[in-house]
C-alpha cells in the first residue's frame, strides 16, 4: 500500500521531470522537430548511398552525434570540424540521433526507440560508432582513444615511454 501511494505521489513529478528533460534537449538543438524530438530526414547521410550504407565519407554508422558546443548534429567529428570553426569534443557528447528512426536520445550503441544497432563497435568514452567490416577495435585507457585491434595484452600493448599503442608483433623491437 505504501508503494502504491508513493507511485501515485511521484507519477506527476516523474512525468514533469521527463518533459523538462525533453524540452531542454529540444531548446538547445538546431534543425530539430521539437514536437517529436527528432532530426529532419534530410540530415541522414551515407557512407555508400548506392548500397544504402549509412554514415559519412569517414565512417559507416547509423548515428549522428550532437556537438555540445554548437548543438548541431554531425555524423562524425571530422565532418563537424570541416563544417565549423570549432572542434567537436567527442568526450563531451551526450546526445545522438538515430538515422534509422531519426529520434534524438542519449548516446548509446543501439537506438532505444527502433532497436537498431548503430555501430558494431561503440565506445561510450569516445562516443565512437563504427561498422568497419569486422576489424576489431578497443579503447585504450592510456591513450584515451579507440584503436584497431582486439585489445591491450591480446594483440596490442601500450608503451608508457612512447605513450602510444603498438602491435604485439612490433612491441619488443620499438
Image: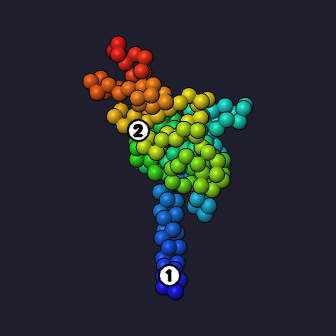
Determine whether the residue tagged by mark 1 lies in a helix, strand or loop.
helix
Q: Secondary structure at mark 2?
A: loop
Q: Residue at x 51, y 45 (%)?
A: 65
Query: What residue sits right under mark 2 in the picture?
Result: 87
Label number found at residue 3:
1
Query: Residue at 61% across / 29% down in the picture?
Result: 133
Name of the residue lying farthest toward the top: 173
* x then y, percent, for residue 68: 43, 49
> What is the CA distance from the residue labelled 2 to the residue labelled 1?
48 Å
Judge whether 150 appears above or below 168 on screen: below
Residue found 52% across the figure and 86% down from its top: 1
The reply to whether residue 12 is in sight is no
Q: Is residue 135 left or right of residue 81?
A: right
Residue at the image point whose x is 69% and y is 33% from the top: 49
Q: Is residue 35 left or right of residue 16?
A: right
The residue closer to the viewer here, 108 or 168, is 168
Q: Crowding near pointer 2: few (<14 within 10 Å), some, many (20+)?
A: some
Amino acid at each position: 500500500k505504501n508503494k502504491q501511494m508513493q507511485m501515485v505521489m511521484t507519477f506527476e513529478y516523474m512525468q514533469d521531470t521527463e518533459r523538462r528533460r525533453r524540452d531542454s534537449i529540444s531548446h538547445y538543438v538546431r534543425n530539430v522537430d521539437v514536437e517529436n524530438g527528432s532530426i529532419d530526414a534530410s540530415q541522414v547521410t551515407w557512407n555508400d548511398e548506392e548500397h544504402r550504407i549509412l554514415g559519412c565519407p569517414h565512417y559507416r554508422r547509423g548515428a549522428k552525434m550532437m556537438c555540445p558546443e554548437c548543438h548541431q548534429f554531425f555524423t562524425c567529428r571530422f565532418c563537424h570540424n570541416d563544417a565549423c570553426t570549432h572542434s567537436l569534443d567527442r568526450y563531451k557528447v551526450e546526445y545522438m540521433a538515430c538515422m534509422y528512426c531519426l529520434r534524438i536520445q542519449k548516446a548509446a550503441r543501439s537506438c532505444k526507440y527502433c532497436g537498431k544497432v548503430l555501430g558494431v563497435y561503440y565506445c561510450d568514452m569516445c562516443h565512437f560508432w563504427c561498422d568497419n567490416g569486422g576489424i576489431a577495435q578497443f579503447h585504450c585507457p592510456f591513450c584515451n582513444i579507440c584503436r584497431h585491434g582486439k585489445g591491450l595484452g591480446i594483440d596490442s600493448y601500450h608503451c608508457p615511454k612512447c605513450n602510444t599503442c603498438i602491435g604485439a608483433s612490433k612491441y619488443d623491437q620499438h
